[in-house]
Image (spheres, rainbow, N blue to C red):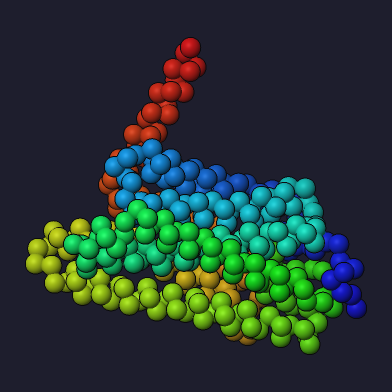
Amino acid sequence: MSNSSSISHFLLLALADTWQLQLLHFCLLLGISLAALLGNGLIISAVACGHHLHTPMFFFLLNLALADLGSICTTVPKAMHNSLWDTRNISYTGCAAQLFCFLSFISAEYFLLTTMCYDRYVSICKPLHHGTLLSSRACAHMAAAAWASGFLNALLHTANTFSLPLCHGNALGQFFCEVPQILKLSCSYSSLKELGPIVFSISLAFGCFVFIVFFYVQIFRAVLRIPSEQGRHKAFSTCLPHLAVVSLFISTVMFAYLKPPSISSPSLDVAVSVLYSVVSPALNPLIYSLRNQELKAAVKVLVIKYILILSFGLLG
């Protein structure tokens, strides 16, 4: 028997048993991380530097890219370090900090995706009121509310989770600190303390999901009433990337946290966690840039500008 006061560190799940596989995992994580950093970094730079992209849609996309960068930078570096140096340790405070940061970014991302859905709804269904409903001030308030909600949700779960006494050792069945894995280590009588925050988060997430479904029902009804095929295609093009990102995010997170214990296994848990914590942040920039000509053009101009600056710097 042990308790949280006697635990100085946790043991994360090793991604492989042999050095060769550990090195392979390190290279894969490094490649995906660099792709996520490059893609999200280009989006942030393009939106920040391109004055014609200073619209609500791209403002929320910039915030989404920041959340993606934050979530992947919270979990992947430690996993890469453990794979490269053949270790599993993470300190008690480091685990708490990782859990708090990851929950903050992942929660903020979900709230931002809900807000972006509202932006698409106003743009398509209420275009005459777009300037009023989505003014610069309103957008700043909605983005701040999304980040603040993510912060408070993470604070609630982190404080409550790490206040529980731990009776089942310190080995986590995941490559990063995650609430369900820490709850498995808690004493059976105390794990009920986390029930309240879990119910609150599920209710909040379900409320956002209902809003997303409602907004998209209204959007599709409005799009189908557009007389011209070109108009319908343009409207769908602005919605499909967001719908794809929302579907990928919600499906993987719901499966990770709400799947029945009967189909749970360490390898499946890791695979699903990699999808929503590593792969999704790397794919989001690609999904958004594929069908958005404005964003593609801005990124292209930015890349050419950086190449010219670098070339002149080397020549000088």
Q: Picture coordinates of residue 149 (x, y %)?
A: 53, 66
At x 48%, y 12%, the residue is 316
At x 28%, y 76%, the residue is 217
Q: Is 153 situated left or right of 16 in this image?
A: left
Q: Is residue 95 above or below residue 212?
A: above
Q: Quadrant of residue 194?
A: bottom right
Q: Picture coordinates of residue 64 (x, y %)?
A: 46, 56
Q: Is 236 situated left or right of 214 in this image?
A: left
Q: Is 235 situated left or right of 159 in this image?
A: left
Q: Is residue 298 above or below residue 160?
A: above
Q: Nearer the viewer, residue 55 or 72?
A: 55
Residue 253 in sight:
yes
Residue 123 in sight:
no
Q: Is residue 25 above or below residue 195?
A: above
At x 33%, y 46%, the residue is 54
Which residue is situated farthest in the top direction here? 316
Q: Quadrant of residue 100?
A: bottom right
Image quadrant holding the N terminus, namely bottom right
Q: Picture coordinates of residue 296 (x, y %)?
A: 32, 44
At x 72%, y 49%, the residue is 81
Total numbered labels: 0
Q: Picture coordinates of residue 143 (x, y %)?
A: 44, 59
Q: Nearer the viewer, residue 10 or 8?
A: 8
Q: Nearer the viewer, residue 21 or 247?
A: 247
Q: Nearer the viewer, residue 6 or 85?
A: 6
